[in-house]
Image (spheres, grey):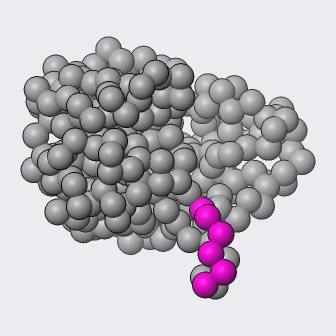
């Protein structure tokens, strides 16, 4: 089974659009997206997010800043967005230039507008199982993808390859919680794990999120497992007009023969990440207008 993230994301987009149409339209929800520099991938990602905003009725504010901007000046921009009552969500696209500390930037965004879910307060709320914070978009999208694909997580052994604060750690926390759509037994493996294939072969659900093209091969996967590929890697391809193609962390062609279900790249988790950004922005907007 090929797990169609594009279809599930489109359905969720429509739900957000309809919910927004039914809400009290005091104003249009707004997502501020900050891009520092001219990284082609960052510009492309922000453009796709802006298009998704437009489809559901969210205003996208694209704030493009010079790569030479100081950290202090970037913090000033974030402060203004924090104080702007018309802005519901703030996203600072990564990677940032080396002279800017991403952790400092994450902490500077108001937790109430942190629709990426990276602020320490929102991370802490996720760890404690609180419902009032924002969950990072890729982990949230992965959870929804599993639920809407009818893949049972409770009681299953989930192995996550990768321990980043963007995906691995929050996703492990999300799937092990004592809640509906969770209750999994989660193992996190990484670059320092010994005999990694022995562990991945035990997974009922194997999730790849380490950013290494085609890292997961068929011999690392248990027969009949589900494989979720969160990788998004650009590799050179002269046949493409862009000069590159997007591949995942899983060797799709070999693994699909062995597993029960698998997400493609592109078209799997990627669209779910974008739609969950819209979902978090919509929820932030609703919290504002209800007050």
Q: Position of residue 208 (x, y in %)?
A: 40, 43
Left or right: 105 with respect to 46?
Answer: right
Q: Residue 223: percent from the left, percent from the top?
A: 17, 46
205 is within the stretch colored magenta: no
Residue in the foreground of this view, choosing between 12 and 230: 230
Residue farthest top in this picture: 128
Q: Where is residue 290 in the image (x, y as percent from the top left)?
A: 30, 39
Task: State which quadrant residue 179 falls in.
Answer: top left
Q: Where is residue 202 in the image (x, y as percent from the top left)?
A: 23, 31
If the image is split into quadrants, where does the C terminus sit? top left
Residue at image point 15% right, 35% down? 153
Q: Can residue 103 be seen from the camera position used here?
A: yes
Q: In which quarter of the image is residue 41?
A: bottom right
Front-lying residue, 7 or 90:
7
Residue 269 vertical position relative to residue 176 in the rendered view, above or below: below
Residue range highlighted in magenta: 234-239
């Amino acid at each position: 089974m090929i797990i169609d993230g594009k279809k599930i994301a489109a359905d969720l987009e429509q739900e957000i659009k309809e919910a927004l149409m039914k809400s009290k339209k005091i104003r249009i929800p707004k997502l501020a997206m900050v891009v520092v520099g001219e990284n082609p991938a960052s510009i492309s990602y922000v453009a796709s997010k802006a298009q998704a905003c437009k489809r559901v009725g969210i205003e996208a504010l694209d704030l493009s800043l010079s790569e030479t901007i100081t950290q202090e000046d970037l913090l000033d921009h974030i402060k203004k967005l924090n104080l702007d009552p018309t802005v519901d969500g703030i996203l600072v696209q990564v990677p940032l230039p080396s002279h800017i500390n991403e952790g400092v930037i994450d902490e500077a965004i108001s937790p109430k507008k942190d629709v990426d879910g990276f602020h320490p307060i929102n991370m802490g709320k996720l760890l404690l199982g609180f419902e009032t914070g924002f969950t990072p978009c890729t982990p949230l999208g992965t959870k929804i993808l599993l639920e809407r694909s009818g893949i049972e997580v409770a009681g299953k052994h989930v192995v996550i390859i990768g321990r980043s604060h963007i995906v691995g750690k929050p996703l492990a926390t999300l799937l092990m919680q004592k809640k509906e759509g969770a209750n999994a037994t989660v193992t996190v493996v990484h670059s320092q794990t010994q005999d990694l294939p022995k562990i991945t072969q035990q997974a009922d659900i194997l999730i790849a999120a380490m950013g290494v093209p085609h890292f997961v091969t068929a011999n690392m996967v248990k027969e009949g497992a589900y494989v979720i590929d969160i990788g998004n890697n650009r590799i050179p391809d002269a046949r493409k007009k862009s000069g590159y193609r997007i591949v995942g962390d899983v060797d799709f062609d070999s693994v699909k023969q062995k597993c029960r279900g698998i997400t493609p790249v592109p078209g799997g988790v990627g669209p779910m990440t974008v739609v969950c950004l819209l979902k978090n922005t919509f929820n932030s907007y609703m919290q504002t207008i209800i007050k």
